[in-house]
Image (cartoon, grey):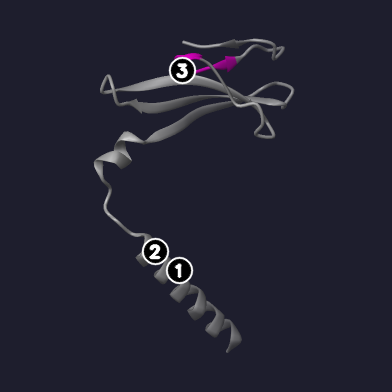
Amino acid sequence: MRKIASLISLLITIALCTTVYARKLELTDWLNFESVEDVQISPDGQRLVYSRQRVNKFSDSMDNEIWQMNADGQRNRFLRKGGHARWSPDGTRVSSE
C-alpha cells in the first residue's frame, strides 16, 4: 500500500511540475538555441573537444564553433570556428574541417 501511495504522490508531483512550467516556444527561445555535438575525448582522457552550434542573430545564420575543456568541466575555451574536431593520436593537437 505504501508503494502505491508513493507512486501516486510522485505522479502528482510530476504532473504539477510539468503543468507549471509548460509554455509555448517563442521566437526568443529559438534565437537563444544552442547545441553541442561531436564530443571527442582526448587520448589521455583529460580533455574534451566539441562542436557548438548556435544562432547568429545578426547574420541570420548558424555559427559552428570548436571548444575545448578539461574533463572536469574547468577551462572551457573557444578554439576556432568550424566543426568536426578530432584529436591527434598523441593528444597534443586538434584538427578540424
Kind of residue at disc 3: Gly
Give yes or no for contact between labels 1 and 2 (Cβ–Cβ under 8 Å).
yes
Q: Secondary structure at mark 1?
A: helix
Kind of residue at disc 2: Thr
Nearest to the observer: residue 67 or residue 39? 67
**Magenta residues?**
80-86
**Residue corresponding to mark 2:** 18
Q: Secondary structure at mark 2?
A: helix
Nearest to the observer: residue 7 or residue 26? 26
3 or 2: tag closer to the N-terminus: 2
Kind of residue at disc 1: Ile
Q: CA distance from mark 1 to mark 3?
A: 38 Å
Within-10-Å neighbours for mark 2: few <14, some 14–19, many 20+: few
Q: CA distance from mark 3 to mark 2?
A: 35 Å
Asked whether, in this view, residue 58 is left or right of residue 65, the answer is: left
**Residue corresponding to mark 3:** 83
Asked whether, in this view, residue 97 is left or right of residue 46, the answer is: left
Vertical placement of residue 16 versus 89, above or below: below
Residue 41 point in image, percent of width and height: 64, 26
1 or 3: tag closer to the N-terminus: 1
Which quarter of the rendered picture does the N terminus lie within? bottom right
Q: Which label sits on residue 14?
A: 1
Q: Residue at point 70% right, 21% down?
A: 43
Residue 58 point in image, percent of width and height: 28, 22
Vertical placement of residue 93 versus 30, above or below: above
Q: Residue at point 28% right, 48% down?
A: 25
Within-10-Å neighbours for mark 1: few <14, some 14–19, many 20+: few
Q: Secondary structure at mark 3?
A: loop
Vertical placement of residue 67 versus 25, above or below: above
Q: Is residue 75 magenta?
A: no
